[in-house]
Image: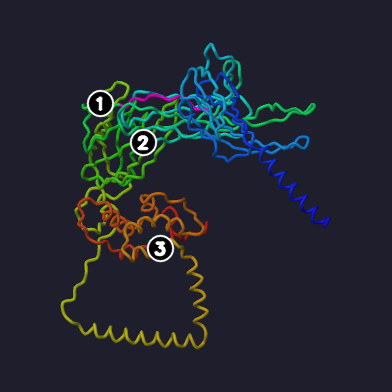
Amino acid sequence: MVKVILKLLIVVTIVTTIIVSQSAFALNSLTASIDSNPVMSNESIVLTVVADDRVERDALDTSPLLADFIVARTEVSSQTSMVNFKTSRTTRWQIVLIPRQRGNLTIPALTIDGHQSQAINVQVIEQGSASSTQQQDIFVSAELSSNDIYVQQLVTLTIKLHVGVQLQRGSLTEPSLTGASIEQIGKDQESDSIVNGKRYRIVERTYAITPEKSGDFTLITPMFSGDIMVQSKRRSGFLSFGETKPVNVSGDKLALKVRPIPDSYPVDANNSWLPSELLTLHQEWQPVSSQGKSEFKVGEPITRTITLTAAGLGKAQLPKIVMNVPAGLKVYPDQAELHANLTKERLISQKRQNFALVASHAGEYTLPKISIAWWNTVTNKYQQAVLPEQTITITANPDAPQSFINNTKKAPLIIPTESVKAPLAQPIIIEKTSKLQWLFLVLWLLTSIAWLFHVIYLKRTGLLSARGKTKRKVAKSVNNHYLALMAACKKSNAEKALSLILPWLNNLNPNKNHSEISTLSEAITLIDNDAFTCAINNVQQHLYGKDIVDTPWLGENLIKVIQQINASGILDNGRSKFTLNPQ
């Protein structure tokens, strides 16, 4: 009986405690406060709303704040504490607000379950005004290189974040502009500076903005969002605690006027729209002509380098450089090199391209002018960057055979007249059958049969393997370039065969008594072989000749010459391989 009574007392106590607790923790009040007043323009304030009970996170409706403020972020926390056996519960909202305008604004009353917080008047003043008594701890400055530009004209936006307090974390958003491409240029730059007597750490960032539409626009500058360290109001003896405070700071909105393409600009297939502050063309020649004359030799490599430089244009906006050449010249353009640098808040872009020229014979050639149309945004006028037409003179090359310089209409196999030392033997034509032919045929068959028996005898006695080792030792001297050159000739690949001539010759002799060969003219002089000279000229005529009929090149003649030279080696400076002993 006693146990039953005790159980009933426990149940009654628990129920009473729950009823009392529910009545004790009912929501009774809702308070609101801000961390600073007045507040600087573009600077955030923190609105703290506290309910004296644990409620749901979304119980507070913040939509009334959007009339005069930007709600940057909201953080919600709950806390339960007990003092002298008295338990209390609170729910706290920290709302970061950014004023939309200057002047006297009002934070309206907020409501939860019929309970309202008090309204708060906020004074928003401009930075640096007479009403401000202190400087901002964090602020963002933004500057455009120009606020009146043409469509597709590049403008730079410089953002500077000034931080005058201890920063725990932070980030910057990207700028925003309708109908424009935005790209960051380079990396962030950090520095220290003193503004109105206060030291700031400055983070500078630059953007390249290219509008694609004309009209009047408003550029939304980046917003800073982060947490800073503040001194806590709680103190314990001689110890003080640090707390973090959320901060959001936005830069000023910037007006931008974008003009359309002028009617006086001739936009067509040859002229693209290029708005720039400065656009120039520059050229260089390699090798450098002597005494300022544009004179070159047949067979030597000629390189024309054209550089296009533009201020206020991105690398992707630079036009293609086209170089036309007259008959008798061939042009081989390399891939263009693109560069961009930021100089005095101006983006300087550059395109550099090399053009290799090959002349088939001597003479004078006139290169047409190169012109690029552009619009001068400083003078608002149509202009052209021009490289005037230029005449170059191709002279005969004393190191090259005369037949290669002038005679481009002859047969592919050309024998230079200057290097012929003996008349060529005339072919013998046999018009009727002779008894000697049959005699030679019988003797050849007998010789072949004797050679076959000799090979069989060597295999049985084992002497052939020893000789094979000797042959393999000789084969070791064959370099890889020689094998590749022979393969190119057998496939009749003229371009590859010509490119392998110099590597093969430079690796021909293991001792390398001769200096490295860098040009085909040096190779012809060093080898001093008529057949080799003719074979090289034949390849060059096929690749670079002007009036040669489009017939396939055959590498049989070059193979024979290569095999002969590879077997004997390079003669050092034209001297005999055998030397006499001194007397």
**Residue position marked by numbered label 2 in the rendering:** 288
Q: Are marks 1 and 3 in contact (CB under 8 Å)?
A: no
Amino acid type, mark 1: Tyr
Depth check: give the residue in front, 152 or 533. 152
Residue furthest right in the image: 2
Q: Residue at x 50, y 67 (%)?
A: 476
Marks 2, 1: nearer the viewer:
1
Q: Secondary structure at mark 2?
A: loop
**Residue position marked by numbered label 3 in the rendering:** 484
Q: Residue at x 28, y 84 (%)?
A: 441
Q: In this picture, is 143 found above or below 510?
A: above
**Residue position marked by numbered label 1 in the rendering:** 382
Q: Earlier in the sequence, mark 2 or mark 3?
A: 2
The residues colored magenta run 248-258
Q: Secondary structure at mark 3?
A: helix
- When asked about the image quadrant of residue 495, the answer is bottom left
Q: Quadrant of the N terminus?
A: bottom right
Marks 2, 3: nearer the viewer:
3
